[in-house]
Image (cartoon, coloured by chain):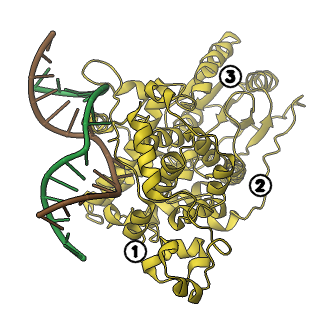
Chain colours: A yellow, B brown, C green
Amino acid sequence: MSGPIILWFRQDLRLDDHSALIAACASGTTVLPVFIEDDAVARPLGQTSKWWLSQSLNALNQGLRERGAQLHVFKGDTAQILKELAQATEAVGVYWSRCYDPEYIGRDSQLKSELKEIGLEAQSFTGHLLFEPWQVENKSGQPFKVFSPFWKACRAMGITRQPQAAPKAINCYQGAMPELAWAKSDLLPFETHLNGHWQTGETGALKRLEHFIETILTGYKDARDMPCVDGTSRLSPHLRWGEISPLRIWHTVQDAVHAERVPAKDAEKFLAELGWREFSFQLLYFNPNLQKENLQQRFNAFPWVEDTEGFERWRNGQTGYPIVDAGMRELRETGYMHNRVRMIAASFLIKHLMIDWRHGEAWFWDQLVDADPANNTASWQWVAGCGADAAPYFRIFNPIIQGRKFDPEALYTSRFVPELNNLPVKYAFSPWEAPLDVLKTAGVDLGLSYPPPMVEHGFARERALAAFSGL
DNA sequence: TTTTGAGTTGTTCGA
DNA sequence: GTCGAACAACTCAAA
């Protein structure tokens, strides 16, 4: 009787369409599922991410239990734990799904050779992305730097892999677990104000996908931009922890198109969002410093302003621009912010306050349920204009116009900035323009119940234009 | 090698 | 109120 294969879970907390799990189950030996909390390697998780992860691990464990297995969670040095565990259980191999965080890449290949040296079968599998970053290249054999041709090339390559169903049962390693020197992880599920907002775990992810296709995807192209509408997939946090595979999403959506349950134009728009996710990971893969450094070096000379108080007001949703404040408060309350509002809020920090995008990125990293090293960073760089996109210098969001255009009845804004609820919609995005008697009737006292705008738009726009033209 | 067309998400101003 | 033009210059990707 040979020992188990250790199935090392990381950002692939699902049983559906899991190549490493399928391979482990097919190996003919038993499977030992583990998760290791290792703070030493990657960027420390934010509070919100820790919450989601703990929920997700719990859900994964439940799924495993239903199939006769169990998840073992450890904390400490990954290599040491895997080696000691392998030795103690006489494991024959370690399987895992690839991650693309630059911090992991070197460590993982090092780990792979170390495991092989002690006679273990060490294998990594795909599953987090539709395309491996090194597979997609332009005609010169280089990675793409512009999204459209990148995605066009992806589509031309086509997707041949089919998602694989979760195994019905898992032949779990039943031997004694050794006394281990390392502490158990403290990633136990805990209650926060976020619990009511999300259905975490693989089951929640699959349910949301079905709901999205059934009731949201039709009309997605237009509704996705309206924060007052439930018009986006909200699959991002599930994708972040691999509770659902992009391949599963891809095929489920394509099947719905072929069955004429959803219009192709809406589906294409949504699939392109998956494409952006692929593109961000590709950028991170080829630019390991993406999280810290401007992709476009000329931005190193940008005259960022150190403004602690301004940053604090932005974080707290007290900028005096209702659409920005609504977004920042949504983030705090729900761990999420609508995509359109993310752009507006990020643009405001960067272009109106001229605060370094890295500060905003760090806050989002701490607060977002879907914060991942690729999408979060690439998107912040995109808004800042220093990312992989020749942003026209004049693309500066006007927070008043954006509010009126995308939240025309101020429904979204009034949900998160209720102190302005009684203002006529006309003034909902520029309360300082309301006549005094209107303010008084609405119970708004600018400076007391709601702040006046911290910077005047026209001034901020000119200042930002000047700063950008100096690069 | 050179050339050509295009690049997620906008705003303002003047007719 | 609506509509079209103007708003830099540069880099990327492919022909």
Amino acid under disc 1: Pro
Which residue is disc 2 drawn over?
A189
Residue A78 sits in quarter: top right
Check disc 2: other Cα within 10 Å, few if <14, some if 14-19, many if 20+.
some
Q: Nearer the viewer, residue A277 or A455?
A: A455
Tell me residue A9's x, y (percent): 65, 37
Tell me residue A321's x, y (percent): 53, 64
Q: Earlier in the sequence, mark 2 or mark 3?
A: 3
Tell me residue A112's x, y (percent): 62, 18
Amino acid under disc 3: Val
Kindly identify the residue that appears in the image at 59 percent across and 40 percent down: A305
Q: Is residue A358 above or below residue A54?
A: above
Q: Which numbered mark, 1 or 3, is in the foreground of this view?
A: 1
Helix, strand or loop at mark 3: loop
Which residue is disc 1 drawn over?
A408
Residue A138 sits in quarter: top left
- Residue with the most extreme bottom position: A441
Q: Tell which subunit mark 1 falls on.
A: A
Q: Are marks 1 and 2 in contact (CB under 8 Å)?
A: no
Q: Earlier in the sequence, mark 1 or mark 2?
A: 2
